[in-house]
Amino acid sequence: MFKKALLALPVAMALGGLAAGGAAQASEWQDPTDVLQKLLDNNPDSKYLHQSEQNIMMMPDNPALWVAEDGEQLFYEERGPNNASLESCDFGKGPGVLEGAYVELPRYFEDTGKVMDFEHRLVHCMKEIQGFDADDPEVAQRHGNDTDVMQLTTYIAMQSSGMEWQPANEHPKEQAMLAAGEKLFFRRGGAMDFNCASCHGESGKRVRASRLPKMRDSQEWTKAVSWPAHRAGHDNVRSQGHRIRGCAWQMRHAGIKPDSMANTALIAFWNEAARGEPAVLPDLKR
Amino acid sequence: MPAQTLRRGTLPAAIGAVVLLSGCQFFDSDDGDVDITAMSPDELADYIVLESGSYRLEQSVQEGGSARGRMEQDELQRACSFTTSEIPEGLSGEVIEMARASYEEPPGGPRLGDWERGAELARSGYGFRVGHNIDDHSSRPPGGNCYACHQMDPDEPVYGTIGPSLAGYGDARGTDDASLSYAHEVISNPHQYFPCTTMPRFGANELLSEREISHIMAYLLDPESPVNQ
């Protein structure tokens, strides 16, 4: 029941956002279960999308919804040394505008002079607005259901469910990062010579038991990049950054850091590869 | 009110280029310090990987040295980093040449070792991972991870499909010299036959020792091996 109320919330916010003169949305908020159902219906032959029937069955009870709920409270609570809420944080669509913000990131921010991915921006706001220090657990801890960063990420990302991925690509720095992200995706390296395409270049392939999504299939890829997702095998909600770290580790590349240019460029490119497809937020994965 | 961070002035493009060319780290920088729009995508990618502080390059790695060595590309890795689905015209021959030039036959020629040890190595995906969770080769030796990409023993339930099935491989190929040489060449450096393949260079990159390769070859080719039952 609580979850139903939560699902209704973004719609109310959408209306508020539009009334306040927000930019026109490419698409409307949709329940993540409905978004996934449509992807399944449109792609009956995708082995990646159809790997588990339980996936769609569990979506209405996605444990990530509870994490989003915790995130909602955190977002509006006055916290940190500055005793401030995150309502003045600008994720690119104006202070406090969450609707549709997640699917348009990464983007260039005037105030930092940088292209930032979602998590980098969130942490930036927690430091600048709320006054947290880089070493404070509130911003230093990034992974797991009980971290502030995952809770906030899940809540904020959810406000973009069903909307089309459209990472910003107008500013020259955004274009530069997108182009570099493509190069990084295909950059061979590490002890085993892997690039991202080694495992995400073809459809229907497996590494051991894991079905692999294909980057050039935008309908497979939109689910692939739809993080935060409750990862059943980890029993935790995971972020885009957590997935990238895991793949870099499997690739035997050097460890990749959060809030880094490489992380941002890769996310820019992988969101770009899903451009125009609806995001499943939060998603549920094996 | 959100506190604004001071926006540092962007350096002239030329400075970015000098950093790249010299490979030196003049400053601990990120995109606040250099003009990323003045670089080509390749230059920017190299800058991001090697100079921007994005990776834990200083971490020690199992083969010795630091993780920086992992991220600096060799000739073959650079050649195979194209962004198209298919290998560009004319590149195949070049990559095959490169791979052949560095191939070394094992002393005394390729041999078949012990298929049981080969089976263990083919199954194990352990080894060479760094970053947040470092594989400790002193407690557990690295494996060949063949099952990540190949079917081998037809009774093994879980296997990857990035590479072709190798079930019955020895039955089909036999154990003559030509067959042993070919298997060794492919495992050591598969780019000699499959330019820009996704399969790692197990011998050339010293992921497996010659002895370990001989065990895996036995697992593939020995008529007694379950791969050939």
Image: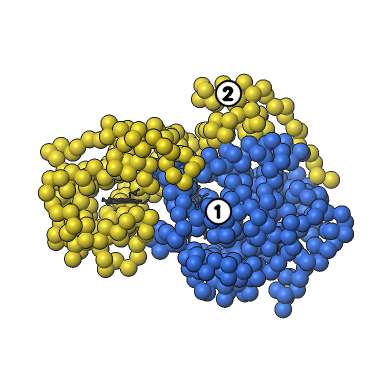
Left or right: where B120 falls relative to A243: left
Looking at the picture, which amino acid does disc 1 mark? His
Question: Where's residue A267, x and y in %?
Answer: 60, 48
Q: Which mark is residue A242?
A: 1
| Hue used for the chain lettered A | blue
Chain whose colour in the figure is yellow: B
Kind of element beneath mark 2 = helix
Which residue does the image show at 76% across and 71% down from the upper left?
A: A8
Near-viewer residue (B201 or A218):
A218
Q: State which chain disc 2 sits on.
A: B
Near-viewer residue (B44 or A65):
B44
| Residue position for label 2 | B17
Q: Going by the picture, which residue comes out furthest to the front?
A: B89
Which residue does the image show at 72% across and 75% down from the upper left?
A: A4
Q: Is residue A62 among the parts visible in the rendering?
A: no
